């Protein structure tokens, strides 16, 4: 018996999520933990479920996720992006719905690097004329 698994990669800041979607009962596991136990902030748990609720597939599919790098909010964004991409692989007719809600776009905002001769990315050392 072969199980059809559909893959999607999600990225946000320095986090990368590898997402597999397959037919099931609605279980979402992140790094071998239920998503409610992995993200303690309820807003992050809701954001993970958002693409599934939008296309009404939350009870139809199981989602298995491996996420690395970054903090909890970055990981949450990466997981959300990966689930949306995997759902498009699962069913191509879902693409317009997810695209309209901008879930297929990668959020490209990153931390700006520190520049030499300065305190930080934009902050300079205090200037004194004398």
Image (cartoon, rainbow, N blue to C red):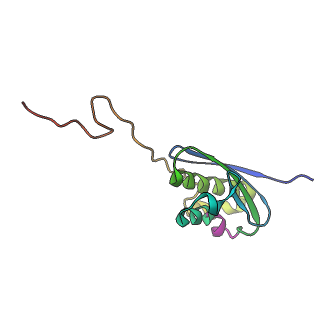
Residue 127 sits above or below residue 74 on the image: above
Q: Residue furthest left?
A: 130
Q: Which residue is painted at 48% across and 47% down in the image?
A: 108
Count of marks placed on residues: 0
Q: Is residue 16 magenta?
A: no
Q: Percent x, y for residue 89?
A: 72, 54
For the C terminus, the image quarter is: top left
Q: Name the one closer to the observer, 58 or 29.
A: 29
- Magenta stretch in the rendered image: 51-56
* Relative height, residue 12 to residue 44 (above, below): above
User: Main SS of the magenta segment?
Assistant: helix
Image quarter for residue 98? Answer: bottom right
Which residue is painted at 68% across and 62% down in the image? Answer: 94
Give percent across and percent down for residue 17. 63, 48
Residue 99 visible in this rendered orientation of the protein: yes
Residue 96 visible in image: no
User: What residue is shown at x 70% (from left), y 57% (from top)?
Assistant: 29
Picture quadrant where residue 25 is located: bottom right
Position in image of residue 32 (x %, y %): 71, 53
């Amino acid at each position: 018996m072969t199980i059809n698994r559909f893959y999607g990669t999600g990225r946000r800041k320095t986090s990368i999520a590898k997402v597999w979607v397959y037919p099931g009962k609605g279980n979402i596991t992140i790094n071998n933990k239920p998503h409610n136990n992995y993200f303690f902030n309820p807003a992050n748990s809701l954001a993970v479920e958002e693409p599934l609720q939008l296309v009404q597939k939350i009870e139809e599919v199981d989602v298995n996720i491996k996420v690395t790098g970054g903090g909890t909010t970055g990981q949450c964004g990466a997981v959300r992006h990966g689930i949306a991409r995997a759902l498009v692989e699962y069913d191509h007719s879902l693409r317009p719905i997810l695209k309209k809600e901008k879930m297929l776009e990668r959020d490209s905002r990153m931390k700006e690097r520190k520049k030499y001769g300065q305190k930080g990315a934009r902050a300079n050392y205090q200037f004194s004329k004398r």
